[in-house]
Image (tube, helix red, strand yellow):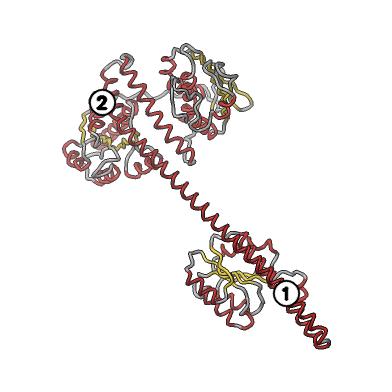
Amino acid sequence: MTNDALVHGEPANVLLVDDNPARLLSYRTILEPLGERLIEANSGTDALRTVMDTDFAVILLDVNMPGMDGFETASLIHQHPRFEKTPIIFVSAINVSDMDRLRGYKLGAVDYVMVPIIPEILRGKVAALAELFRKRRELQRLNAELADTNARLARSNEALRIEREREVHKLNQALADSNTKLATSNRELKQEVDERRRIEERLREADRRKDEFLATLAHELRNPLAPIQSALNVYRLGHDAAGGTIYQIFERQTGLLVHMVDDLLDVSRITRGRLQLRLERVVLGDILAAAIETAQPLIEEGRHRLELDLPPQPVHLDADPHRLAQVFGNLLNNACKFSDPGGSIKVHATVDNGMVDIQIRDIGIGLTAQQVRFIFDLFAQADTSLERPHSGLGIGLTLSQRLVELHGGQIHASSEGLGTGSTFKVTLPIVVAPAVAPGEATAAPAEVAMGSLRIMVVDDNRDSADMLAMSLQIMGHQVRAVYSPLAVTEACGDFEPELMIIDIGMPELNGLVLAERLRACAWRGRPPRLVALTGWGQAEDRKRSLAAGFADHLVKPANLATIERVCRETWVACERQRKEVAARQRE
């Protein structure tokens, strides 16, 4: 590169030395906007070879390199008289001690840059050094011209030389002042970045603790709910479930508590993006029927009139039936809660342009314009007065909005004001169902009569174990309750269970370890089917249960239908095995 080129702002050479190709790429990305000539070296040896051929305005040198590290490379470069003044900026991905800094400065380093690199700071440093390099080259040129002139006009040029030196001094002073200001800005920026990083870390820690608290809270709430639900199951099996005001109150309020616990965990999952839908082809009418069944106790309690208006043809959706029923159940529950007794609730659905609009309209307390704007916010309450007849957590509509959006739809609220009722409209994409030829429809398989099973219930909570055991006994099964996981192996020796329902969070030995030990046992016949029944109900908990050998993972409190399903699946499996054994014996 010629001196004339440097004077007119030609790019200066900048050497980038790092053994990490990704970091070299990041240096190049950061510095390319400066327009300088960037030359790369991936080791100290390569860097020494490169500097012998080219002059560099600044060298960006990684401290930690295999073989010849940054300090040794810098020492060898500055030992050469030609390069003893070449500025070196050390880059380090680890905290550098004061002794390391002192060592680097003794070797001629002008600065340190820590990883992660702040692009603006690095560009500022390199730009300043490159400009200084050009100024120094220009100064060399001027000094050479001045010396040549001084040879001819010694006295005249002496004054000019002094003036030039004064100008250079001012320029250097200005550059030094700029560097001082830049260093101050760099320190302030670094402090701000560090403070921001600490705040983000505290927020992440607070969010993690919140999730752990919600999971633990759900577990602790579900444990006492389990024996209550089992006691209700016992009552239902021994009495007419339709009669009895006390039974209906307990059943309704227990369901409400379970629903609130599930809502808390669903909010945590959605805010962290961990809620996954299990999509399948479903019919809108079936979804609404399930939602109406969920809201039926509140409809009957409030003596509301429910009007259902659906398209004549089935409307097919690709949706998670449980989650979508949860959305419409929430909307129907709200319509019941905020309507006077004997009110009217209308459910109207229309299909247009590949979408279906489902409107749920009530004639209840209505919403103000401000309430409509924030009604879907987390913990928002339409009625915050102490006299409100129905309270809640203020998360049902937030969940409904997120679930509808996960299905590719939208939900909107509208109201003409207080006392005029409210309308919630859910819009969802529909799918075209394949035509079914006559005769292709298959009837549902007939339900197989279930016999008696040997069932062992393992739970350190005696109330929970005894109530579940009593429910199973009324259903006609042989049941043994075991309260200590350490006594399970011995109890299995003479009882030989076909189904084991095991709690996970037990002292002395948790259910996951117990399941692994049971799988390793030598059973005389068919190993028992293992089913987890626990207060831990997040997706990670289910995965751990299945990995430990459980065939199913039930969350406390399990209702009677779920317990019957597990028993029936176990009975079918046992019967299938007995038939296979009998067939082999006949052969």
Q: Which residue is drawn at 72% across and 73% down?
A: 135
Could you tell whether 243 is left or right of 337 in the image? left
Q: Which of 250 and 150 is in front in this view?
A: 150
| Image: 169 above or below 577 | below
Spot occupied by residue 573 in the image (x, y as percentages of width and height): 30, 33
Q: Nearer the viewer, residue 104 or 163?
A: 163
Q: Nearer the viewer, residue 245 or 133?
A: 133
- Residue holding disc 2: 471
| Image: 465 above or below 107 | above
Spot occupied by residue 330 in the image (x, y as percentages of width and height): 47, 25
| Image: 156 above or below 214 | below
Looking at the rendered image, the quarter that the C terminus falls into is top left
Could you tell whether 174 is left or right of 76 in the image? right
* Label ID, residue 168: 1
Which residue extends farthest left? Answer: 494
Could you tell whether 337 is left or right of 254 in the image? right
